[in-house]
Amino acid sequence: MTSLEGRVIIVTGGGRGIGREHSKFLASHGAKVVINDLGGGTDGSGNSAEAAQSVVDEILNDGGEAVANYDSVTEFSGAENIINSAVEAFGDLHGVVNNAGILRDHMLVSMTEDDFDSVIGVHLKGTFAVSHFAAKYFRDQAKSGNIKQRTIVNTSSAAGLHGNVGQTNYSAAKAGIAAMTIVHSQELERYGVRVNCIAPIARTRLTLQTPGLNQVMRKSIFDPGNISPLVGYLSADGCQFNGQVFSVYGGSVGIYQGWSIAEEVSNETLWTLDELTQSIEQLPRFVPVHSQLVAIVKAASS
Ligand SMILES: NC(=O)c1ccc[n+]([C@@H]2O[C@H](COP(=O)([O-])OP(=O)(O)OC[C@H]3O[C@@H](n4cnc5c(N)ncnc54)[C@H](O)[C@@H]3O)[C@@H](O)[C@H]2O)c1
């Protein structure tokens, strides 16, 4: 059986959008939740305690257990502080949900260094930094005999797994997060840690600001609460998966096959340019991909 009862779980970016739903779902199933949120704008500017604190207040009102943390995941010292605040508040740490995110969409020709660095900073470095300090804690606990099933759930995106115009920074970060998931699942298995990843689609301030998506996102399959049961399962004691990336929206949960060789041509000896030019003709020009973007198109036309 899977259980979240008594598990101490950090949700980064847990004050708004999808993270807010994760925080409330986990707490409603008996988890003790650390809600980390910097409380900034969609582009990462500014900060406020309100986002994290309002979710904590809601959870406490409903009889659950939660504390707030306002550090930025982009700072190494902040990431360490997030892990420490869970242990200080609740005496242990069982799971991390790396969810914090921002957007700075621009076409490649107009994307600035700052646009690139800030998005990579929150998503890719933020996931690395929080996972790094969680992993240190998990390793120390395993070595001292405090053996528990521990979990990390990362957040990728269809933009990272399939690519998306105008999102060089975001797509690169989200593809990197999927890759980190595989590496970390292999490195941390020995300490009893399962590391998995989700690629959600949901209505939040990030998707509502995307041109063309506002109307489609009003449909109930894009309610952000639809994402959280999977995160609950992947954070629970008893989760059976490790190193996997899941697609999730509405009532749909899919498991990604990842990059895999669809077809190949081969040669016994070193290819000449002419030989390769001839043989490579046998490979398809496009390999069909089962993408989440299909769900958005379907929802738009129904
Ligand atoms: N909404 C979607 O359809 C969708 C699709 C794919 C992936 N995602 C991913 O899901 C995650 C949540 O996004 P959302 O749509 O709920 O957006 P959101 O803007 O509603 O929530 C993101 C939260 O992260 C917080 N945050 C930003 N920078 C932070 C930092 N440095 N430290 C701590 N907190 C920080 C923000 O304050 C905000 O509360 C993101 O990683 C996003 O890329 C969302």
Image (spheres, rainbow, N blue to C red):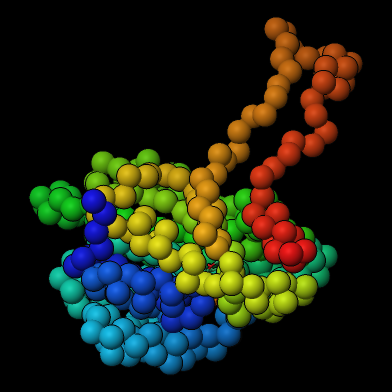
Q: What residue is drawn where x is 71% and y is 77%?
A: 214
Q: Is residue 172 above or below residue 62?
A: above
Q: Please indicate, yes or no, whether residue 177 appears anywhere in the rendered image.
A: no
Q: What residue is drawn where x is 23% and y is 51%?
A: 1
**283 or 84: nearer the eye?**
283
Q: Position of residue 267 (x, y in %)?
A: 73, 11
Say whether residue 30 is left or right of residue 209.
Answer: left
Q: Is residue 227 above or below residue 207?
A: above
Identify the image quadrant of the C terminus: bottom right
Residue extending furthest toward the top: 268
Residue 77 falls in which quadrant of the image?
Answer: bottom left
Q: Position of residue 54 (x, y in %)?
A: 39, 90
Residue 55 falls in which quadrant of the image?
Answer: bottom left
Q: Position of residue 4 (x, y in %)?
A: 25, 63
Residue 121 falls in which quadrant of the image?
Answer: bottom right
Say whether residue 295 is left or right of residue 200.
Answer: right
Q: What residue is drawn where x is 24% and y is 59%?
A: 3
Q: Please indicate, yes or no, whether residue 161 appears anywhere in the rendered image.
A: yes
**183 or 155: nearer the eye?**
155
**116 or 102: nearer the eye?**
102
Q: Is residue 240 above or below residue 168?
A: above
Q: Position of residue 109 (x, y in %)?
A: 83, 65
Say whether residue 273 is left or right of residue 257.
Answer: right
Q: How many marks?
A: 0
